[in-house]
Image (tube, rainbow, N blue to C red):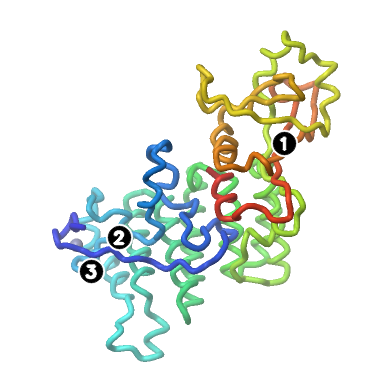
Amino acid sequence: MICAICGNQVIGICGTINIAYPSLDLRGGDGFYHFLQPDFNEGNEDDEDDEENIEYSFVPSYCCFCGYATDDITEELPRARELIKTAAYKKIILEEEDFFNESPKKNRKTLPQDAVACNAAAFLYEKEGLLGNAALQSLYAAWVCDDTKGKKWQAIRFRKQALSLIEKMRKQGNFLRNRQDVTELITVDLLRRSKQFDVAILTADKFLKTAATHGNPLLKNSLQFEKTLSSQKDGKDHSILEIISHWNSIPFSSFTIAGIQYRQKQGFVRKQRKMMLNRPVSLVAEPENEHDRNAIAIYWNDLHIGYVPRRRNREVGALLKAGYEDVLFATVTDINLDEYIDRQIVVTLSILGKNPPDPNYFFMTILA
Ligand SMILES: [Zn+2]
């Protein structure tokens, strides 16, 4: 690729991926595209032939000639030209390891090239006002340090950097990937893994009381697991698999049934809605639906009672499409007949079975 700043030809760097399952900070497992990738799930969703070309690495591209680093150095960020000349930027670039002149003492203060690239990109994104990108690049820098021997305190340093960027974002009312629940989980993981255990517990408690995680039992359980780990002063990497592997059924998502008002004429009356508690319902994709080709109909026995709410369509549709039909289980877990009709019936989705499907794919799919 050609660097947009200096015009030199640059060879891409390949990054480090060596964890088996998704971490609590949503880092994807071995060879897996992780949820926090900036362009995850964007682009043409019908283009399935493209899968082989997926880039698994999370590190940004980096020009070793001028030091420019962003997600794509063939594109120029507005202020990059002036910013990469600043003393602050040069200091970041100089943290790179010098493999030819390496004393153990010096080595502790230096960084692997991938971490330098992430940190440099974080700096540029922050100055450009792109706080979310800057926070993610700081988190990626921590992942590179996690993967590199002797870089524990550097990993903590980058987690603290990510935390302060996320805090700035929150003050502006913004969240990573526009998801408050995901941002809350990552915040608590960052606190725990930077060994701020007491703050991690208090923050997890605070987030457990907010509504953000309530629609997603898996994220709620993750926060509870974070609390347990923090109370044991455990600052290590933990996998999402540790939460789901001992469950016979994994509840991971809830929503209220939409469109019931249109179904009353077909015979789905109040008296029937009253009897729905703990009953299973089935989910049927309606690709031919003229209003919404992603529509998922909900049936109780043979009665069409409503739809999965539009904003949750993609998540459920992705699971059905990925072949989870046999293990996906939808049950009515709450009924509030005093509520507005489309908020009356709560359905919880679970995955059944002692051997859950590939946790990488499962987790990434439900967050889609
Ligand atoms: Zn360059």
Kindly report the distance in space between the C-alpha atoms of the residues bearing marks 1 and 2: 43 Å
Q: Residue at x 67, y 33 (%)?
A: 255
Where is residue 16 drawn, in percent x and y?
A: 42, 68
Q: Is residue 259 above or below residue 200?
A: above
* Residue 337 in view, yes or no: yes
Q: Earlier in the sequence, mark 1 or mark 2?
A: 2
In the rendered picture of this protein, how many numbered marks are placed on residues?
A: 3
Helix, strand or loop status at disc 3:
loop
The percent coordinates of residue 183 (x first, y second) are 55, 50
Q: Which residue is mark 2?
A: 61
Residue at figure coordinates x 49%, y 69% from the top left = 18
Q: Position of residue 20 (x, y in %)?
A: 55, 65
Q: Nearer the viewer, residue 163 or 322?
A: 322
Q: Amino acid at mark 2?
A: Ser
Position of residue 51 relative to residue 112, above or below, is above
**Ligand 1 position by quadrant:** bottom left
Query: How would you rate the neighbour count of disc 1 (Cα within 10 Å): few for under 14, some for 14-19, many for 20 or more?
Result: many
Q: Which residue does the numbered mark 3 point to in the structure image?
A: 64
Ligand 1 within 8 Å of the CB at mark 3: yes
Q: CA distance from mark 3 to mark 1?
A: 52 Å
Q: Closer to the camera, 200 or 332?
A: 332
Evaluate whether residue 183 shows in this view. no
**Disc 1 marks which amino acid?**
Ala
The residue tagged 1 is: 330
For residue 302, what is the image quadrant?
top right
Q: Which residue sits at x=16%, y=62%? A: 9
